[in-house]
Image (spheres, rainbow, N blue to C red):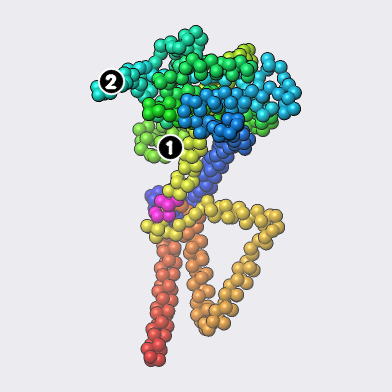
Amino acid sequence: MAEASRWYLGGTPKHKLRYREDVEIRTTLQELLLYSIFLINLCILTFGMVNPHMYYLNKVMSSLFLDTSVAGEERTNFKSIRSITDFWKFMEGPLLDGLYWDSWYNNENLYDLKNSSRIYYENILLGLPRVRQLKVRNGTCKVHSFFRSLMDECYDKYTSKNEDTADFGLKQHTEWKYSSPRTNSPWHWGFVGVYQNGGYIFTLSKSKSETLNKFINLRMNSWITRGTRVIFIDFSVYNANVNLFCIIRLVAEFPATGGILTSWQFYSVKLLRYVSFYDYFIASCEIIFCIFIIVFTIQEIKKLKEFKFAYFKSIWNWLELLLLVLCFSTVFFSLYSNMQIYRMIGRLLRNTEKYSDFYFLAYWHIYYNNIIAITIFFAWIKNMFLAIINDTYSEVKADYSIGRRPDFQLGKMIKKSYNNALEKLKLKKPETDEDKKRENKDLAEKARREGFDEKEIQSAEQMKKWKERLEKKYYSTEIQDDYQTVTQQEFRDLFLYAVELEKELHYVSLKLNRVMRKVSALQ
């Protein structure tokens, strides 16, 4: 009986369908707006950490330490090092001149030697630079029996298994004694090997003359041997004008084939992140980012409880989980790096006579940037470009498959809101019945000019009115059901419309036949 009543009344009441449609569209708009805010916030966090001064600081430092040549006629710089002799020339020349800026261009003293060097007068040298060597043992490879009479020593490529840990040379200071690597230090990936931390290490002095004497002493006592496989030169500077750290590593690899391969790393990073008002704006965006993570996590937990194992059958749910993992990873890296930064800076300020390993922080900061870049990439993929487009395509395909005209309700709502806003701002006149009548008259006049008779024009106007009335009734955005029941009166109206349409098609067919006959007669 209920079904009969529903059939007699013509289907679901329109006010309920309209309410359901409005709720669905409003929910879609809210979700789209919320996710758009999340994307904007994520973009601000990503690009807010990028500073154009980073490029210029890297360029200035690389030009100083890579392109500066040895004084005199020789053109030896760090990039052109090919032998041990070239290496010591660089150490005693361009490296010393680049690290120690203790006087102004007119030879006036800049500061007391108790303070750090100021490279280019603006960049403070943090702590003391460090030089580190890794070696391999003799006998790590075998000499063929034919050549043992000529060579009885053999040094293989560097591996942790082949590494030499015995004291050598003068055996007096740290540069002649092996230091064990720290467990949390990252390994370095070079051209011909992967190198761990530790080795034969020494730090430079704050005095340029003392450092020069140190280099001369090491050179005279053969600190670099046949077993040497790599030498690292590490130091960091801070520019207070732009609040940037530049962590520098110069690497000279000594492959088993002989010669030297040079490489370098310059990382300009913003480790002290909360200084200016803009930095605090970024901090507020970070708080909003955390709130979004909590909200999205709660949503996914609810979906998981509702769908259980079926939740994992959707690729979009896997994408949501991946985004959450990446978001939590960025938060973890940010908190960890901030704690390490303040701990290390406090240690540096307490003792400026030691090397401060900011390379460790730069290493993890680069990983943080990579993770947040991957996060924003997948966040944009999750956006309308795939998910919403896929849903829309499915709906349109379903509409065509059942013979319905696809109805993009969200677009219609936006267009309607846009027109209403223009009308309220008096930038557009509201459309009235007079406008519609005027448009119909214009169309009729155009048809008369093109040679249609009055009977055809009146018939076309009647069909148009009939069509608009039926479309308003059956293609209305107020009804979303794919299948709707109709009353007997509605069915009669549809049948009459089909009959009239058949008459019009028959009339058009007759006119076409007459035209074709006339064309044939002319031929």
Q: Main secondary structure of the magenta part?
A: helix
Q: Which mark is residue 319?
A: 1
Q: Which residue is mark 2?
A: 148
Magenta residues span 392-398
Residue projecting furthest to the left? 145
Secondary-structure class at tag 1 = helix
Eye-nearest disc, 1 or 2:
2
Q: Is residue 94 above or below residue 43?
A: above
Q: Could you say where residue 214 lies in the image, as x and y percent from the top left? A: 56, 16
> Which quadrant does the C terminus fall into?
bottom left
Answer whether residue 189 is visible to the viewer in this image. Answer: no
Q: Is residue 36 above or below residue 239?
A: below
Residue found at x 62% / y 29%: 244
Residue found at x 50% / y 11%: 174
Q: Is residue 404 above or below residue 67?
A: below
Taking the magenta stretch, the answer to whether it contains residue 489 is no
Residue projecting furthest to the top? 172
Q: Residues within 10 Å of mark 2 (few under 14, many from 20)?
A: few
